[in-house]
Image: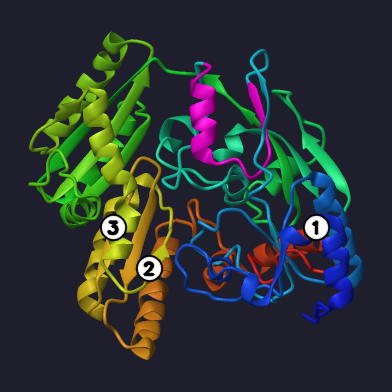
C-alpha cells in the first residue's frame, strides 16, 4: 500500500480540528500507543489525535481519505491481536475521550453511549436502574467501542449471547468522512442487508463507531455460583455437554486448572476458596429468587457428582462470589506476570470437542518443550490458550511459537472450530483466518472491505 507520509500541512489541519492540546507527534506520543495488551507488535503512529465528537471524526476522516493517509482507530488498547496498532504509521485516532452516556430509555430498554465508555461504567450505571447489560468480557476496562469492534463475548455468553446480540443501532463515520446511522431502537428489522451486524466484529476496518444503542434486560435479583473440583481436567470438560443436554442453562460455565489458580493467588495476594484439586468448573446461575436458582443448580450439582466431581462448593454470599470471580478475572494478568512474553490462541470449537482440544494443547507442551497455560469459557467452546516464552532466545521463541500455533489452529479446524471466539483477527491471526476461510471466503471479505473503504486507508493490514 502506498500511503502519504504526514507533513506539516497535515499537522496544521489536525490542530485546526482538535486543538494543539489533543494532537501529539514524535516523543510526545506515549509508548503505550505503539502496541496493544500483549505487546507482540510494535509500531508508532506518525500523529496521535484525541477526538471528542462525531463531527471531529468526520472532518479528520474526510481529510485522510482525500489525502490517502492511513488511519487507525483506538480505544483502551486492551486487544490481543494487534488490531489497534498503526502498522503503516499515519494517523491514530484515540476515541477514549468520547466517553459519555447519552441516554437511558427505560421504555425501550436501551442505553445510548459514545464509544469510549468503559464496560465497567456501563454495568454500574444500568444496575443502579435495576437493568442489566449482559456481555461480560474479562477485561472490564475495555471500551464499548472495542467490544463492538471485536464482537466481544465473555463469561455470560452461554445464556445471553455476545455483544452483537445487544447492539440495536450504531452511528458510524465511514472512511470518506460521511456519517451514517444503522439500526436503531427497533426490536425487529428485515430492511435489506444487516449492516449493523456486519460492523460489529469488523475491528475498525469498515467504519468508526461514534455512538451505540445497546439493548438492556431487567436485572436478575439473585446470582449463585458453584465451584466444582474434579480429579482432572478431562473429567471436568466432559461434564459440560451433559449439563447443556439437561436443558439447564447456567449464566456462565468456566473451566480452570490448579496451576493457573495458584498463579492468580500469588498475583492477587489472596487465597482462592479451594485450590486442592487439579481442575475445576465454575458455574453461575441467575434468576429472580433464591428458590428458583436452587431448583436449577441442584440438578446440575447431581450431574457433576455423578460425573466424578469431588465436591460441589456453593458460593451464595457476595464475599464468596467476589473471591472466586476476582481470581478468575486475574487469570490473564497472572499468567502474563509469570513469564517474559506470551501469545494467545483464542480458538472456539464445538462444546463436545473442548476436552479433546485441551488435551491436544497440553500434549504440545511436551512435544515442543514449552509452557502452555489455558482457561476458558467451557459453556461456549471458547478457549484461551497461552504460549509462554520464559527465557527462550528470540529466534527459538519465534520458531516454537509458529510451530505450536500451526498445530493448534490446524487441530481447531479439524474439530470444526474457528480461529477466534472473541478477540478478533487483527494483524497477528491473519494467516490462520486465510487458512480457515479459504480463497472464496477471503475474496468476499476483501470485496466487503473495498465497498466500504475503496482506498484501504482505515486500519490497514488488519483482518483481510
Q: Quick check: 238 left or right of 416?
A: left
Q: In x, y percent, where is residue 19?
A: 80, 57
**51 falls in the magenta region:** no
- Crowd rating for badge 1 (residues with CA inside 10 Å; few <14, some 14–19, many 20+): some
> Looking at the image, which residue is at 81% across and 77% down?
6
Examine the image and state in which quarter residue 148 appears: top right
> Looking at the image, which residue is at 56% across and 62% down?
425
Mark linked to residue 334: 3
Q: Quick one: label 2 or label 3, which is nearer the N terminus?
A: 3
Please tell me whether mark 3 sits on a helix, a strand or a loop: helix
From the image, tell me which residue sits under label 1: 19
Q: How far separated are the C-alphas under marks 2 and 3?
A: 23 Å
Q: Nearer the viewer, mark 3 or mark 1?
A: 1
Position above or below: 387 against 322:
below
Q: Which residues are magenta?
A: 110-129
Q: In x, y percent, where is residue 202?
A: 66, 54
**114 falls in the magenta region:** yes
Q: Nearer the viewer, mark 2 or mark 1?
A: 1
Q: Quick check: 439 left or right of 290?
A: right
- Crowd rating for badge 2 (residues with CA inside 10 Å; few <14, some 14–19, many 20+): many
Q: Nearer the viewer, residue 456 or 437?
A: 456
Please tell me whether mark 2 sits on a helix, a strand or a loop: helix
Examine the image and state in which quarter residue 356 appears: bottom left
Colour mapping: rainbow
Q: How far separated are the C-alphas under marks 2 and 1?
A: 48 Å
The quadrant of the image that shows the C terminus is bottom right
Q: Nearer the viewer, residue 461 or 56?
A: 56
Q: How far separated are the C-alphas under marks 3 and 1?
A: 40 Å
Q: In x, y percent, where is residue 170?
A: 74, 38
From the image, tell me which residue sits under label 2: 408
Amino acid at each position: 500500500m502506498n500511503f502519504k507520509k504526514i507533513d506539516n500541512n497535515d499537522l496544521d489541519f489536525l490542530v485546526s480540528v482538535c486543538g494543539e492540546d489533543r494532537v501529539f507527534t514524535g516523543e510526545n506520543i506515549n509508548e503505550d500507543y505503539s502496541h496493544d495488551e500483549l505487546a507482540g507488535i510494535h509500531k508508532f503512529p506518525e500523529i496521535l489525535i484525541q477526538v471528542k465528537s462525531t463531527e471531529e471524526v468526520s472532518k479528520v476522516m474526510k481529510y485522510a481519505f482525500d489525502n490517502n493517509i492511513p488511519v487507525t482507530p483506538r480505544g483502551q488498547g486492551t486487544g490481543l491481536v494487534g488490531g489497534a496498532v498503526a502498522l503503516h504509521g499515519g494517523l491514530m485516532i484515540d476515541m477514549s475521550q468520547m466517553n459519555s452516556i447519552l441516554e437511558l430509555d427505560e421504555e425501550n430498554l436501551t442505553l445510548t453511549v459514545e464509544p469510549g465508555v468503559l464496560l465497567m461504567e456501563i454495568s454500574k450505571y444500568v444496575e443502579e436502574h435495576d437493568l442489566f447489560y449482559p456481555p461480560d468480557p474479562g477485561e472490564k476496562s475495555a471500551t464499548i467501542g472495542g467490544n463492538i469492534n471485536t464482537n466481544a463475548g465473555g463469561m455470560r455468553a452461554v445464556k445471553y449471547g455476545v455483544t452483537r446480540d445487544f447492539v440495536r443501532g450504531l452511528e458510524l463515520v465511514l472512511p470518506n468522512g460521511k456519517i451514517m446511522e444503522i439500526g436503531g431502537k427497533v426490536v425487529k428489522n428485515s430492511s435489506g442487508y444487516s449492516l449493523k451486524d456486519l460492523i460489529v466484529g469488523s475491528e475498525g476496518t469498515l467504519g468508526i463507531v461514534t455512538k451505540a444503542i445497546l439493548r438492556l434486560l431487567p436485572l436478575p435479583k439473585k446470582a449463585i455460583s458453584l465451584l466444582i473440583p474434579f480429579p482432572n481436567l478431562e473429567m471436568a470438560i466432559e461434564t459440560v455437554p451433559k449439563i447443556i443436554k439437561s436443558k439447564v442453562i447456567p449464566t456462565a460455565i468456566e473451566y480452570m486448572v490448579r496451576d493457573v489458580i495458584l498463579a492468580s493467588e500469588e498475583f492477587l495476594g489472596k487465597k482462592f476458596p479451594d485450590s486442592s484439586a487439579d481442575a475445576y468448573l465454575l458455574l453461575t446461575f441467575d434468576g429472580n429468587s433464591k428458590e428458583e436458582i436452587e431448583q436449577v443448580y441442584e440438578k446440575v450439582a447431581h450431574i457433576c457428582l455423578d460425573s466424578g466431581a469431588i465436591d460441589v462448593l456453593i458460593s451464595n454470599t457476595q464475599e464468596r462470589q467476589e473471591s472466586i470471580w476476582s481470581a478468575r478475572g486475574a487469570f490473564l494478568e497472572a499468567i502474563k506476570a509469570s513469564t517474559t512474553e506470551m501469545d494467545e490462541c483464542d480458538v472456539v470449537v464445538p462444546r463436545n470437542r473442548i476436552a479433546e482440544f485441551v488435551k491436544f494443547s497440553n500434549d504440545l507442551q511436551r512435544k515442543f518443550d514449552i509452557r502452555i497455560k489455558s482457561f476458558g469459557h467451557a459453556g461456549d467452546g471458547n478457549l484461551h490458550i497461552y504460549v509462554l516464552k520464559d527465557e527462550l532466545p528470540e529466534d527459538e521463541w519465534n520458531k516454537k511459537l509458529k510451530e505450536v500455533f500451526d498445530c493448534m489452529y490446524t487441530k481447531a479446524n479439524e474439530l470444526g472450530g474457528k480461529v477466534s471466539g472473541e478477540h478478533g483477527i487483527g494483524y497477528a491471526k491473519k494467516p490462520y483466518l486465510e487458512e480457515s476461510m479459504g480463497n472464496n471466503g477471503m475474496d468476499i471479505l476483501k470485496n466487503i472491505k473495498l465497498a466500504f473503504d475503496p482506498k484501504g486507508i482505515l486500519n490497514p493490514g488488519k483482518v483481510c
